[in-house]
Image (cartoon, rainbow, N blue to C red):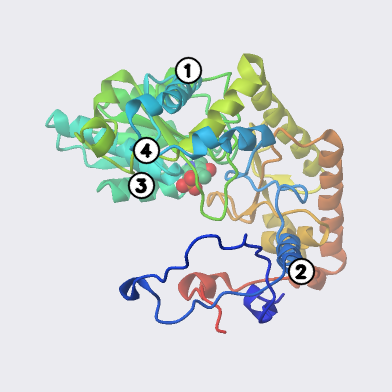
């Protein structure tokens, strides 16, 4: 499709300005541009068509089934956008006087109270702008705690091999040595491997439960007990809380701090770079180390972002929680888990689950056998799904499963959709048996087929040559 600059025609315009009724004044020379900016010239209809064309180029949750897995976008009710668009919230400035921001402060306090209740924590910050940023903040809490006690020998953070890549990255960013422990054959934490890794140098453990293969670790209380016994602290990666919210709380599992992606579980759409919010909660003994805003709180301790963070994202989370209420929150996670299990049962007839047992909000398929038999890879299958009009699942993650496809249907898909999806997986599998080449070259009807992802990451071209 053509760029908006290529569509531009001199003289086409969509701006109707009111007649000038004041004296015309030129800007001072030193504030003026040397030459006019090069802006596209289009009529209103042309602009509107341009954006509509762009919409058709992308696939989103409004287009159809989007089972990504792990980083899935959950339900983003429109009412949250409406509330977050209210001028009394959008027009506020963080430096506005105290008496003008009471409502906003109340939003932050209420959201903190509710998220503390949901996560089982005692205190909270909304400064971090994303999940990884929240992890960084949370691990800095752990670090400050050990430092304050003069406990300098604790240099290591334990991370299971099924962890999201941001976990080891966070530990390394905070200056820790990362100790990777292999998962047990059942996909959960290997207690013997954990015990062997624990010691006087353990600063903490980073864990997500249910883990990235969608399994709830039945040994969780033993795991957090062992870490505490060794003098370490327990960090909970709560990026996706939709499997457990309203049922189990990280705080009750024995975790000391947690981040929650408000832009995954609590109603803010994500993708395209944000804005998001990685709310970080902690137990009371870590609260003194929470970040403070230099301008708002006087600036003691760490600060990871300006002011109170992405306020409107917090507002959407509060709206979401209040809309669903005490019954709706646990119901959302029940439905998310039910949907994942229903879909797993349907797709199980087609491809092999990596772990064939009741899952939580997501599950992982292992296509190794299928690849051996047909030469068709998980990537080929994912690409072929696009031809059938659904978005591919997360591929090749977690790393502990080869030829992995990870599916998370979320709580908002209907039974009819899940049945159709299982049927599409069956068709794709048959296509691959009958005509492998068709899958090696898929997708056949998308604007972009198989981009060279390595080249795109190493040598990104972010500017059009005009
Ligand atoms: C998405 C995700 C993260 C990172 O969150 P970002 O907002 O993308 O930084 C961390 N852990 C898990 C399990 C996730 O799914």
Residue corresponding to mark 4: 94
Mark 2–mark 1 Cα distance, whole angstroms, equals 47 Å
Q: Earlier in the sequence, mark 4 or mark 1?
A: 4
Q: Is residue 59 above or below residue 76?
A: below
Residue 442, label in figure:
2
Q: Earlier in the sequence, mark 3 or mark 1?
A: 1
Residue 464: image quadrant is bottom right
Residue corresponding to mark 3: 170
Which residue sits at x=53%, y=24%? 218
Q: Earlier in the sequence, mark 4 or mark 3?
A: 4
Nearer the observer: mark 2 or 1; the answer is 1
- The answer to whether mark 3 and mark 1 are in CB contact below 8 A is no
Residue at the bottom extreme? Answer: 466
Percent x, y of residue 308: 37, 35
Q: Earlier in the sequence, mark 2 or mark 3?
A: 3
Foreground pick, 87 / 117: 87
Nearer the observer: mark 4 or 3; the answer is 4
């Amino acid at each position: 499709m053509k760029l908006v600059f290529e569509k531009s025609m001199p003289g086409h315009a969509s701006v109707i300005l009111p007649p000038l009724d004041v004296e015309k004044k030129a800007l001072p020379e030193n504030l003026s541009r040397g030459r006019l900016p090069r802006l596209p010239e289009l009529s209103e209809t042309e602009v509107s068509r341009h954006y509509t064309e762009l919409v058709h180029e992308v696939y989103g949750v409004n287009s159809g089934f989007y089972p990504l897995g792990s980083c899935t976008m959950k339900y983003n009710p429109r009412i949250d956008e409406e509330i977050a668009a209210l001028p009394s919230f959008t027009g506020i400035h963080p430096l506005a006087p105290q008496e003008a921001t009471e409502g906003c402060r109340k939003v932050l306090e209420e959201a903190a109270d509710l998220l503390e209740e949901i996560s089982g924590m005692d205190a909270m910050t909304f400064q971090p702008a994303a999940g990884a940023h929240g992890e960084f903040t949370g691990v800095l809490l752990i670090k400050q705690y050990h430092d304050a006690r003069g406990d300098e020998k604790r240099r290591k953070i334990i991370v299971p091999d099924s962890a999201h890549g941001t976990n080891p990255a966070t530990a390394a960013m905070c200056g820790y040595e990362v100790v990777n422990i292999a998962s047990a054959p059942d996909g959960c934490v290997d207690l013997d491997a954990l015990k062997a890794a624990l010691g006087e140098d353990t600063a903490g453990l980073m864990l997500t439960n249910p883990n990235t293969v969608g399994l709830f670790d039945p040994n969780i209380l033993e795991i957090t007990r062992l870490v505490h016994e060794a003098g370490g602290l327990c960090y909970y990666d709560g990026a996706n809380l939709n499997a457990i919210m309203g049922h189990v709380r990280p705080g009750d599992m024995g975790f000391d701090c947690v981040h929650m992606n408000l832009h995954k579980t609590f109603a803010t759409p994500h993708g395209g770079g944000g804005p998001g919010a990685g709310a970080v909660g902690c137990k009371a003994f870590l609260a003194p180390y929470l970040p403070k805003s230099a301008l708002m709180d006087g600036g003691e301790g760490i600060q990871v972002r300006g002011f109170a963070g992405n306020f409107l994202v917090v507002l959407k989370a509060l709206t979401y929680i209040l809309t669903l209420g005490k019954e709706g929150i646990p119901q959302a996670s029940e439905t998310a888990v039910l949907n994942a299990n229903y879909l797993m049962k349907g797709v199980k007839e087609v491809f092999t689950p990596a772990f064939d047992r009741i899952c939580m909000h997501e599950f992982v398929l292992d296509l190794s056998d299928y690849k051996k038999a047909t030469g068709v890879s998980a990537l080929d299958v994912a690409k072929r799904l696009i031809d059938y009009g659904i978005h591919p699942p997360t591929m090749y993650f977690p790393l502990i499963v080869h030829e992995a496809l990870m599916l998370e249907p979320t709580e908002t898909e209907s039974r009819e959709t899940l049945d159709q999806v299982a049927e599409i997986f069956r068709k794709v599998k048959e296509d691959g048996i009958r005509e492998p080449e068709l899958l090696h070259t898929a997708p056949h009807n998308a604007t972009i087929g198989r981009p060279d992802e390595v080249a795109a990451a190493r040598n990104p071209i972010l500017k059009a040559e005009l």
